[in-house]
Amino acid sequence: MKLSLDDLDHKILQILEEDGRAPAKFIAEKLSVNEVTVSKRLAKIIDGGFCKIIAIADFEKCGYDHLLPIGIRVQGDKLEEVAEILSQQKEVFSVNVVSGIQDIEILCATQSLDETKVFLDETLPSIVGIKSIAPAIASNVYKFETDWTPFANEA
Amino acid sequence: MKLDQTDKKIIQLLGADARMSNNQMAKVIGVTEGTVRNRIQKLIKNRVIKISVINNINRMENPSLAFVGLDVETRAKDSVAKALSKMKEVRFVSSLIGRHDLMAFVLAEDVTKLSKVLYEEISSLPGVRFSESSIGLKYYKYDYRWARILD
């Protein structure tokens, strides 16, 4: 049987959205259920792969000043290979194969202009199969939501 | 805010599981529980980290993602970016140096909704001259621990 989330699970998640580190005891009291129930539900939500409760870090405040949204065009037969190689680069934190003008869209974070130059002028051109790149630096990020994301193939 | 090794370790541990107790973290890192508590408070207050519930995209019926590059009238750049930011399905908005004036990522519950956002809502924003979209087919990598904490 496929697991799904019910009312109580959603109520627990609502409290966690306010404070992700709220103790099970606190949640239990707020919802008038017992603590063991809350712990079991949390295990279902997290181990079942529905949600993760984690800290998101602001890459700029962690010293990664440059965010680069780069579009990449690739030789048809090299698409998967290039996507795999890009995924292995530590400064690349998102790799998506797309259909449209570009073949792959990536997000990359670098710590300095020097690192940006190395990535654009050395790292990317050295990957066999890349035909062209459409580089950019994000100058002003207005919105960056993360409440719905893929869980597969995380770093 | 300057981050030291203890901060970085806390960020790493909380990035894997934000439900880990202060006591457990203190043991792993080799500092006192009080230090862990203070550091977490400071990291959150300074918006270095944000404890978040993130939902697995596979719970959506037919999630449809588009990467949209926009060319806009120079004077309208800020107003278009702000209007995009207000749209629920628009998950990411930034002004760019290079490739386009603005870039947005749009995530909709299905293709019908996605095309409505792309071809009705975004195209009709005043100041948008041209937009170019690519549709996401497959994620090879996504590290959800990285973002900007803006609000």
Image (tube, rainbow, N blue to C red):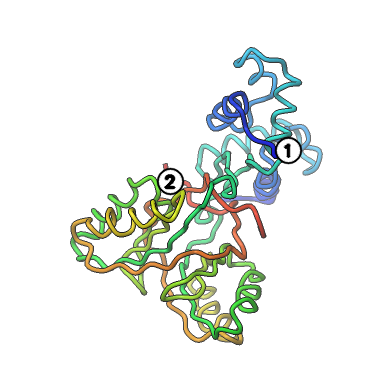
B102 on left or right of B36 = left
What residue would you read off at disc 2?
Answer: B150
- Give the residue at x 28% y 50%: B83
Give SS at disc 1. loop
Chain at numbered mark 1: A
Look at the image and tell me in which quarter the C terminus of chain B lies.
Answer: top left
Q: Which of A107 and A51 is in front in this view?
A: A51
Q: What residue type is labelled 1?
A: Met
**Residue B3 appears at what percent x and percent y?**
60, 50
The reply to whether residue A85 is visible in this rendering is yes
Give neighbour class at mark 2: few <14, some 14-19, many 20+ (Cα, 10 Å): few
Mark seen at residue B15:
none
B4 on left or right of A94 = right
- The answer to whether B20 is drawn above or below residue A127 in the figure is above
- Give the residue at x 28% y 53%: B121
What residue would you read off at disc 1?
Answer: A1
**Residue B87 appears at what percent x and percent y?**
34, 47
